[in-house]
Amino acid sequence: MAAIIYDIRFFEPATGPLRMSGGGGFVMKTFASFILAACLLSLASKPRRGAQPSSNWFSVPRAKLCVTEGAIEQASGNRMSVNVPKMRAFVTIATAQDVEAHFTYLGGTTGEKPLGSGEMRRQFGLKLRAQDACNLVYAMWRIEPESKLVVSVKSNPGQHASAECANRGYRNIKPVHSRPVPVLRPGATHTLRAELNEAELRVYADNNLVWEGNVGPLGGPPNGPVGIRSDNAKLEIELRAGQSSGSHPDHQLSCRPGSSEVE
């Protein structure tokens, strides 16, 4: 406030012409530069926040999930619980490529299992365009051994079952914009949301944009379902998806238990 009063002294009264006297020009330029720098710093420090998707949301009940590996149990209200080393599931009703999980991380599971590659990892994430076990897009919130958000595409044209593609065809996608995700601690509740518009993907953690980029031609078929996946993470989840504007609301995919993905 003192700086503002000091600068005002270099101006004539408001009733006269607006002129600077003495070194006022230098002072005002310095003050203006300071204000501009402060504003830019403030904007840079704020996380990029995303508006809700244009599609309407609906809650996905347990009955509308096809669990292809592991188990998902009904919890209170619309929440579901996961307490198995490996869980894979997709939504059996038509949706937009918008999916959101409001989840509570409860720590590790009993009897942890490595990925198909042999790596031990704890993670939870979303699936998009999940035509089958060999062709889909992942947005995974890795918990251990390193906390980060990773988007990957699994593409194996002509192959549809895990027995055919195993853990081949994975490619991590480099974002055009990203920021760190919070470290997940047992008992903490967070939200993970993914929005895929053609090949352009945006991923939000707690409503903050944490990943933005193009998944490219390996993004899989445009009409694959959305879903969820976890590895060695105990969770309670409330799942939501965007309503589809193209498919009949009564359209339902067949459930194919055992058609799980391998990594």
Image (tube, grey):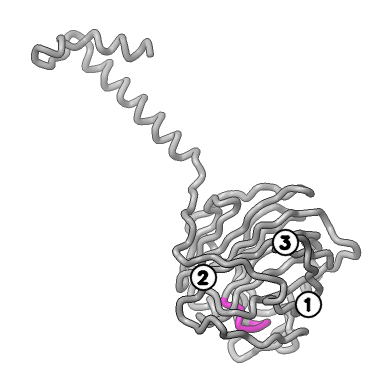
Q: Is residue 44 left or right of residue 71?
A: left
Q: Amino acid at mark 1?
A: Glu
User: Disc 2 designates what residue?
Assistant: 215
Q: Residue at x 71, y 76 (%)?
A: 63
Which residue lies most toward the front here? 77
35 or 26, which is in the foreground? 35
**How far from the left and from the top, in percent, is residue 39?**
39, 32
Which residue lies most toward the bottom here? 158
73 or 133, which is in the foreground? 73
Marking on residue 77 = 3
For residue 184: magenta? no
Q: Residue at x 22, y 13 (%)?
A: 24
Q: Nearer the viewer, mark 1 or mark 2?
A: 1
Can residue 256 be seen in the rendering of this structure? yes
User: Disc 1 designates what residue?
Assistant: 69
19 w.r.t. 118: above or below: above
CA distance separating discs 1 and 2: 26 Å
First along the sequence among labels 3 and 2: 3
Q: Which residues are magenta?
A: 129-134
Q: Residue at x 61, y 85 (%)?
A: 252
Q: Residues within 10 Å of mark 2 (few under 14, many from 20)?
A: many
CA distance separating discs 1 and 3: 23 Å
Which residue lies most toward the left here? 17
Indicate the quadrant containing the C terminus: top left, top right, bottom left or bottom right: bottom right
206 w.r.t. 197: above or below: above
Q: Amino acid at mark 3?
A: Gly
